[in-house]
Amino acid sequence: MRDEISYDRYIFAANLKRLMQRSGEKQVDIARVLGVSKATVSAYCSAAQMPRMDKIEQLSRHFGVSRAELIEAVSVPPSYSRQEPRESGARSPAEDIYDSLNGAGQEEFIRYGRYLRSQPEYRAEDTRGRAGYIKHFLVPAAAGYASPIEGEDYELIERGDDVPPGADFCISVSGDSMEPYIRDGELVYVRRGAELSEFDAGIFYVDGDVFCKQWCTDYSGTLHLLSANAARQDANITIPRSANRSCVCFGKVLLPVRLPKPLYW
């Protein structure tokens, strides 16, 4: 299972928020239109989740726009090559563009810049020491009970010797369902896009909530997100292939040992 976050989701998120601002609607209003939870709409707006095509059709009719206006880039800020250091007080082209935008435009400008910064092919070699830092997401991943995602809430922390090679971000785990391998409150390190083998631990986004679980599938294609702690089987999550549920893997949890198959499974 691979991390499924993509640029397409970023484009959709930007277009959705632009149309919501134009219509004066909030996430709760869109949730009513689509018949989904507010957490799901929040995931759409933060580019964590891409809706199914039938939901895109509903939004297209609701806003009175074409599907293309929801899923295609309306405009892309121009890219700039690295330039010689400017004189003190001189303004960059990016600053001029930012100042010419309204509040919503500035928010999208920043979000797009963050997206570019996250992509190795766009990142400058010298990123002011960011290579020595790692994102610590402040919303915990539930190991037992769900914790809602609240957008891109993170801080940069220094990479210490305890950070495993290849780690892209870290997140705290809340709950005891992954004990004894991951303790309540423990910080785990995650690699985006890593291939998960059966019973590996990952960070999963399910219907608007974040979980740290082992995973496997059965002969029918049903996805099982499992607790390592046999006493917390009540926190297992089962998603049949035919279920109308959303599940995204944010990445593989990097642990010093390979997790065994749960004893009860």
Image (tube, rainbow, N blue to C red):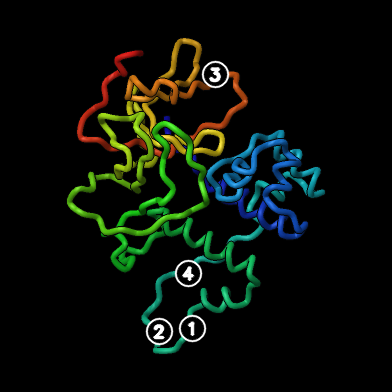
Please tell me whether mark 4 sits on a helix, a strand or a loop. loop
Position of residue 137 relative to residue 263, above or below, is: below
Q: In which quarter of the image is the N terminus?
A: top left
Q: How many marks?
A: 4
First in sequence: mark 1 or mark 2? 2
Closer to the observer: label 2 or label 3?
3
First in sequence: mark 3 or mark 1? 1
Identify the residue shown where x is 38% and y is 42%: 192
Q: Circle 3 sits on which residue?
A: 240
Neighbours of disc 3 within 10 Å: few (<14), some (14-19), many (20+): some
In which quarter of the view is residue 257 placed?
A: top left
Identify the residue shown where x is 48% and y is 83%: 91
Identify the residue shown where x is 71% and y is 59%: 21
Please tell me whether mark 1 sits on a helix, a strand or a loop. loop
Residue 111, given in percent of the width and then of the height, sits at 53, 60
First in sequence: mark 3 or mark 4? 4
Please tell me whether mark 2 sits on a helix, a strand or a loop. loop
Identify the residue shown where x is 30% and y is 45%: 187
Which residue is at the front of the view, 160 or 174?
174
Which residue is at the front of the view, 209 or 258?
209
User: CA–CA distance between discs 4 and 2?
Assistant: 14 Å
Q: Circle 4 sits on which residue?
A: 80
- Asked if labels 2 and 1 touch by Cβ distance under 8 angstroms, the answer is yes
**Horizontal relation, residue 59 to residue 11: left or right:** right
User: CA–CA distance between discs 2 and 3?
Assistant: 57 Å
Q: Circle 1 sits on which residue?
A: 91
